[in-house]
Image (tube, rainbow, N blue to C red):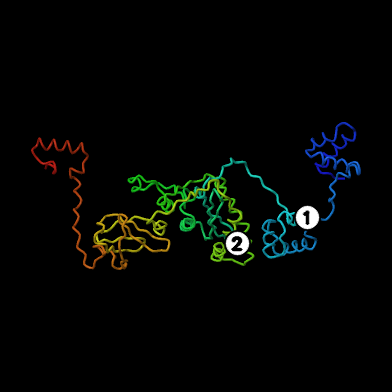
Amino acid sequence: MRMSGKERARLVEMAKVAEGRQRLGEAAERLGISYRQAKRVWRRYQQGGAQGLLHAGRGRVSNRGYGAAVRARCIEVYRERLVTFGPTLASEKLAEWGVSEVGHETLRRWLIGAGMWTRARRRGPHRQWRARRARFGELVQVDGSHHDWFGTGAQACLMNLVDDATGTTLARMHAQETTEAAMRMLWGWIESYGVPLALYCDRKTVYITDREATAEEQLAGQEPMTAFGLACKKLGIAIIAANSPQAKGRVERNHGVYQDRLVKELRLRGISTIEGANELLDGGFVAQLNAKFAKAPVSPEDGHRPLTAGVELASVFAFEQTRCVANDWTIRYGTRWYQITGPKEGMPRPRAKVTVLRRLDGSLHLLYRGHPLTFREVPLEARVVPPRAEHREDPKPRASQPGRPRPDHPWTRPFSRRLLAAEAAARRGTSPSRPTP
């Protein structure tokens, strides 16, 4: 006869009452039940002994049970289509397909009983716990997840932004974790929620650089930064570098959600391209994850800042370089030449510095002291350097070089011998450059 802990405690107290070692009211106080309930328990003990204290519904089929047919159907569908799914996600899919709205814990017990689910929990090293930020938008964690998303062996990168306070996520698929991909992700976050106060990222060269400062940066007192860091500086976003993956655990754990749910959703829908994955992400998949897993922040105040009036995100998220204006008001960018044509009032002088902006759409824009310039591309043939003199058809003859000095020239003698020869010539009244006959 198997008894629960509560039933064993009742058996001990009722046995003491039967032996006369305590009164029924004292037993009720020790069990934490009312005197009226203690009288019922005492009556059942008198009628059936220890067996009477067992729950009357033990061993009986529940009136709210799913039944053997529903259990067999759920296990069959799981074996055919959801064999790698966890119980939680599998229960959601069964309800979505209209099979059964079985709870995930019930499905977990069924799968364990059928030998189709076992999970060994892995414990990692203990690390100090950090509380979430209080406001939404106060800190956003950014990272890229390289994974075989389509099951073809070729890896792609899922760029993921996760808010530290709420767990709200924004994700899109890219080929690699590049500067352009990071810029487009932050651009999308700003359009959706606003400008965050800080970004938490790793030390990848997309976000942090370890190069030495250039001469111009040293003169201006600026620290070296990447193109993404420069864009964040223009928007007033602080970049915080993490020293370990565990430090930005919010986004790292969120990668696991995507690697579990997104991979299986792509497989169920037969999607095998980055474009198709982005259509799925933008079409409601990310919104469903936020509705299911996002939490309410501690503070109701929004930490995002509105975009400053007059700031154009297309100019902020661009690759910026400096070029020097030539004497003919041209600059070179890449392998091409561009002629500055205006405006007449704000034309830069030769040797002046202009800023070249290459936007994410590929267009070029020139700025001088923050003002745009008009320009046109110059054909490469117009900028060919004229040939050097020695390559001309009628080169000028070179001047003849002087011959070598004679062997007895004074300059060829050692310094001490030249000095003695000069003194001797001075006594004779002759020149030291020629030997005396």
Which callout, 1 or 2, points at the residue further toward the start of the chain? Answer: 1
The residue located at (19%, 49%) in the rendering is 405
Mark 2: amino acid: Gly
Mark 1: amino acid: Gly
Task: State the residue lying farthest toward the right.
Answer: 47
Task: State the residue lying farthest toward the top.
Answer: 21
- Image spot of residue 179 (x, y percent): 46, 56
Does 216 sit left or right of 265 as displayed? left
**Would you place residue 376 above or below residue 206 in this image?**
below
Task: State the residue lying farthest toward the left.
Answer: 429
| Quadrant location, the C terminus | top left
For disc 1, the neighbor class at 10 Å (few under 14, some 14 to 19, many from 20) is few
Comparing 365 with 10, the one in front is 10
Task: State the residue lying farthest toward the front.
Answer: 36
Comparing 317 with 166, the one in front is 166
- Image spot of residue 220 (x, y percent): 33, 46
For disc 2, the neighbor class at 10 Å (few under 14, some 14 to 19, many from 20) is few
Q: Are marks 1 and 2 in contact (CB under 8 Å)?
A: no
Return the residue at label 2. Answer: 153
Q: How many marks?
A: 2
Q: Which mark is residue 96?
A: none
Does 394 sit left or right of 155 as displayed? left
Location of residue 273 (image quadrant)? bottom right
Return the residue at label 1. Answer: 113
Circle 2: element type? loop
Comparing 428 with 254, the one in front is 254
**Would you place residue 359 above or below residue 19 in this image?**
below
- Image spot of residue 253 (x, y percent): 59, 51
- Image spot of residue 402 (x, y percent): 18, 53
Q: Name the front one of labels 1 and 2.
A: 1
Circle 1: element type? helix
| Quadrant location, the N terminus | top right
